[in-house]
Amino acid sequence: MCLKTFQGLRCEANTLVVEPMTACYVGGHLAVAPFLYFFLVFFCIGFPLICLFWIFKVYRRNFDPKLDTKYGFLYRGLRRHMVWFRVVPMLINLTLAAEKAYGMDQVTVTFLNGFLFLLNLVLVILAFPFKNFVTNVIFGVGNLGRIILLLYLVYSSRVYFPALLAITCFVVAVAFAVRVVLIA
């Protein structure tokens, strides 16, 4: 939904980038634009912020059972001090949609994707946000797999692919080492 919203709002030279035959803010696009801005403000940006507000509202009330039935879906399965983690994937998805819609160059897109996935992975390794150990491992391995697949798809034909893979593995190893030191 956010990707389509960003694409519907991206104009260059008075035409819609995703559909060059459509003039921006004229005719049909003018009729749809208010809805796109509504989705941008209240869904793409507003929904993660509202979720964060609800999470902290419940957190401040010490997880009141009355609020649990209403907002529990936002933090179930997360450790008590990690309830904010639920918003992280929402913000990552928003960033990915914006970068795709605004057509950044391949190097920037790859760097941003790798950074976001690695950040998410390091957060999981360091914080272990989920109550269930297996969920943390699955989430972490899934993100590591996404990073490696991204690196492979974009850089496999390049000479420095092994170096990128080694850097990724090094960062993950350092995050695990820090986690072990924090536990000890």
Image (cartoon, helix red, strand yellow):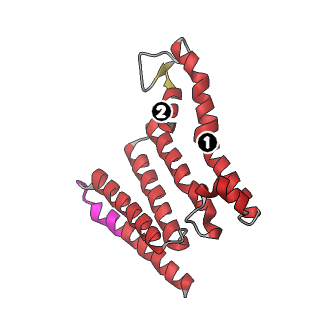
Magenta residues (range): 157-166
Tag of residue 9: none
- Classify mark 2: helix, strand or loop: helix
Amino acid marked by disc 2: Lys
Could you say where residue 170 lies in the image, as x and y percent from the top left?
A: 39, 72
User: Which residue was labeled with disc 2?
Assistant: 4
Could you say where residue 109 lies in the image, as x and y percent from the top left?
A: 42, 47
Q: Tell whether position 163 is magenta.
A: yes
Q: Nearer the viewer, residue 3 or 169?
A: 3
Kindly tell me whether residue 21 is visible in this rendering. Answer: yes
Q: Nearer the viewer, residue 117 or 109?
A: 117
The residue that appears at 59% across and 35% down in the rendered structure is: 40
Tag of residue 45: 1
How many labels sit on residues? 2
The residue that appears at 55% across and 20% down in the rendered structure is: 32
Q: Main secondary structure of the magenta part?
A: helix
Above or below for 21 versus 75: above
The residue that appears at 62% across and 58% down in the rendered structure is: 72
